[in-house]
Image (cartoon, rainbow, N blue to C red):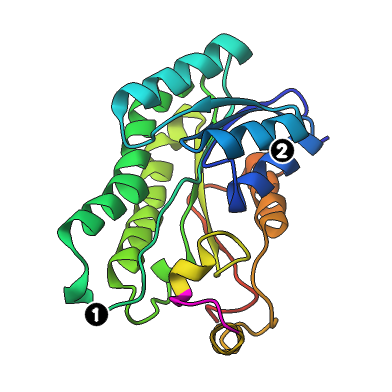
Amino acid sequence: MRLDGKSAIVTGGGSGFGEGIVKKFIAEGARVLIADRDETNAKRVAQTTGASWLRVDVTRSADVKAMLDAAQTEFGDLNILVNNAGVGHLPQPLEGLTEDEFDRIVAVNIKAIYLAAKEVVPRFKATKQGVILNIASTAGVSPRPRLAWYNASKGWVITATRAMAVELAPFGIRVNALNPVAGETPMLKTFMGEDTPEMRAKFLSTIPLGRFSTPEDLGNAACFLCSDEASMITGVAMEVDGGRCI
């Protein structure tokens, strides 16, 4: 019960890594609000875990404010915000990505963290506590070819995490990130371009431990960084990657 008595928001909590984080947080005693634009999956995870859910488009400031207001109404003080929602793009030459696709990457992977910070930081400052966990990627550390703009967006998340951590530390607020390698999530096919045994073997050959990351792996790492056990840890971007970035 490492998160007993704590409350959390997990964006994109209806599937993939977000679902794994929600399940782990609930198992460790937290109260959780799933914020996801996919109502079907959000309801499914809420029903199986006992979490609450709210339809949220993390790229819209009004939705993000409503998300924070709903969590504060339900939980009182909020303790943890996990910025997990993210999107990728199909492998392609960097000059081939359309402007609309680029704008979508920026909106979900970058702007959403900015919008969430504008809403949650004043609330955390008021209570002199809080943990923000941003889900970045090994793509921001060791970029793969043909994923240039996704790589760049996750590099931004890592730098933003460090900048936030050093600025917010005097207020008792910790900010960390996780860098998962490609995982068994709905986004895997997007990164690979096609989900075939040959393409999986190619990806796995770059991971020393020889497997993809799982939602459970991310849930375990997130639980540690958001718990009081990590009270001296801020500004880190921890790889959960089976050795991929070595």
Which residue occupies 79% across, 30% down?
29
What secondary structure do most residues of the magenta stretch adopt? Answer: loop
1 horizontally vs 85: left or right: right
CA neighbours of label 1 inside 10 A, class few (<14), some (14 to 19), many (20+): few
**In the image, residue 94 lies at what x, y percent?**
22, 75
* Residue 2 makes an appearance in the image: no
**Label annotation for residue 54:** none
C-alpha span from label 2 to label 1: 39 Å
**In the image, residue 190 lies at what x, y percent?**
44, 67
In-front residue for pair 138/174? 138
Local secondary structure at mark 2 = helix
Label 1: which residue? 93
Which residue occupies 69% across, 83% down?
210
**Label annotation for residue 25:** 2
Task: State if disc 1 and disc 2 touch (CB < 8 Å).
Answer: no
Would you place residue 52 above or below residue 180 in this image? above
Would you place residue 216 above or below residue 4 in this image? below
* Residue 203 makes an appearance in the image: yes
Which residue occupies 35% across, 46% down?
108
Range drawn in magenta: 192-196
Quarter of the picture containing the C terminus is bottom right
Amino acid of disc 1: Pro
Amino acid of disc 2: Phe
**In the image, residue 187 lies at what x, y percent?**
50, 61
